[in-house]
Amino acid sequence: MASKKFYVVGEYHPKTLLVGVYTPNNQIGNQDYYNEEFLSLVHTLDLPYDLTYFMKLRAPDNNMFLTKGKLEELTKFCSENKIELVYFSEILHPLQERNLEAALGCNVGDRSRIILEIFKKSAHSSEGRIQVEMAEINHYKTRIIGRGTEMSQQAGILGNKGPGETAKEDLRRHIEEKIRQARKRLETLERSRTTQRKQRLESKIPLVCIIGYTNAGKSSLLNRIAKGDVLAEDKLFATLDTTTRELFIDNKKKALISDTVGFISQLPHNLIAAFKSTLDELRYASLLLQVIDLSNPAWKSQVSVVQATLDDLGVKQPIVYVFNKIDKLTPEQLEALQPELEQFQPQVLINTCSRKGVEPLIAYLSAYQL
């Protein structure tokens, strides 16, 4: 179970354990890939850790998340290895997080915390930073309610407020004020976005949006077909801020083309809510290009995650399935995948390594009536 240490140079970190928990209801149907994705999130954040512990859980417990037997196993492991901090691969409810901290005797973080920190690091635009700030504040808000005896009512006289309750109320008011201020700043930016959208709709310029699972190659595709300069790295959520470019085909302006934030299984609800104004742009698109990493064994599950997110957002725009990274597959592997690919129509197969690799998509867009 031990793994290499992943330190941030020059920084002390508490002895940290990563706990990968796979359940039958997980959106990613491959346990090995789910664990790899969890480790990729940790590496993307440069989060230092010392040990890993992977388990399979039949069904999460409402109060403790882990079943009694699994909790006893993990408690023993943490005690033997003097663990101070545990990060879980799943999203924990605040009550589960508090109960696990009490049972394990150490601090506990979850998938939401890791993804929030990645978004915080990746957001560069004013709108992106405010959206992440709102998601972070709301995440923290849910965790102070009912938090321990240090914030509970201290006085024993009926009708009186103890210092703990007062502290909690003060903190809650402070959080509400920060949310109000952030929402006010975001509304100003949203009005500007709405004005820009209105101008675009009046000008009849079509909008093509690139969507897909994180690290599927969305930024690389935008750079290749629209001569963009978007950061494209082999890591999760390498880019977060929406980028829009003009799309020219045969030296004629065809449309505007935008990439969007990448989706992932169990994307925290606070982030979806915070980025709703940005993701609402998808509902005004003429066409969606769903980029899919065909070299990933879990690609079908990733398609399902993206579709479920679009359904939650009420997005019903036409979709073209853009199967990317075919250069990583042999001709025999591609042929074997054909029966599975048939259900995803219309489709194009590309790779973003060269201009020639995206020619099938350019030809499709040239013929498509936007």
Image (cartoon, rainbow, N blue to C red):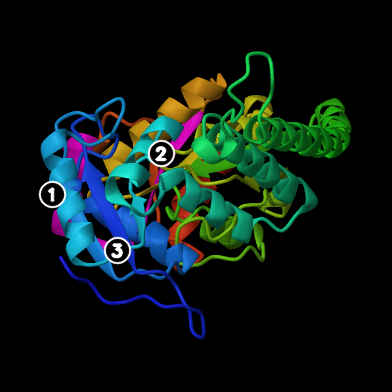
Q: Are marks 3 and 2 in contact (CB under 8 Å)?
A: no
Mark 3: amino acid: Ile
Secondary structure beneath label 2: helix
**Which percent across, then down, holds residue 250?**
66, 53
Q: Which residue is mark 2?
A: 98
Report which quarter residue 235 is drawn in: bottom left
Q: Amino acid at mark 1?
A: Glu
Q: Identify the residue under disc 3.
A: 83
Look at the numbered disc 1 and give the secondary structure of its residue.
helix
**What distance separates the C-alpha of mark 1 from that of mark 2?**
18 Å
Say which label, 3 or 1, has the lower sequence index: 1
Instruction: Residue at 19% x, 42% y: name it.
Output: 71
Question: x%, y% of residue 75?
Answer: 20, 51
User: Looking at the rendering, which quadrant does residue 57 occupy?
Assistant: top left
Where is the C terminus found, in terms of image quarters? top right
Give the residue drawn at x 80%, y 29%.
Answer: 204
User: Residue 320 magenta-drawn?
Assistant: yes
In reply to whether residue 251 is colored magenta, the answer given is no
Q: Please tell me whether residue 193 is drawn above or below residue 332 in the rendered image.
A: above
- Dot 1 corresponds to which residue? 73
Residue positioned 15% across, 35% down in the render: 68
For marks 1 and 2 on the same chain, the one whose residue lies earlier in the sequence: 1
Going by the numbered disc 2, the residue's amino acid type is Arg
Position of 3 relative to 218 (above/below)? below
| Residue farthest toward the top in the current orientation of the protein | 158
**Labels 1 and 2 touching (C-beta < 8 A):** no
The number of numbered badges drawn on the structure is 3
Q: Is residue 52 left or right of residue 165?
A: left
Of 194 and 275, nearer the camera is 275
The magenta region covers 319-340
Residue 34 visible to an observer of this rendering: no
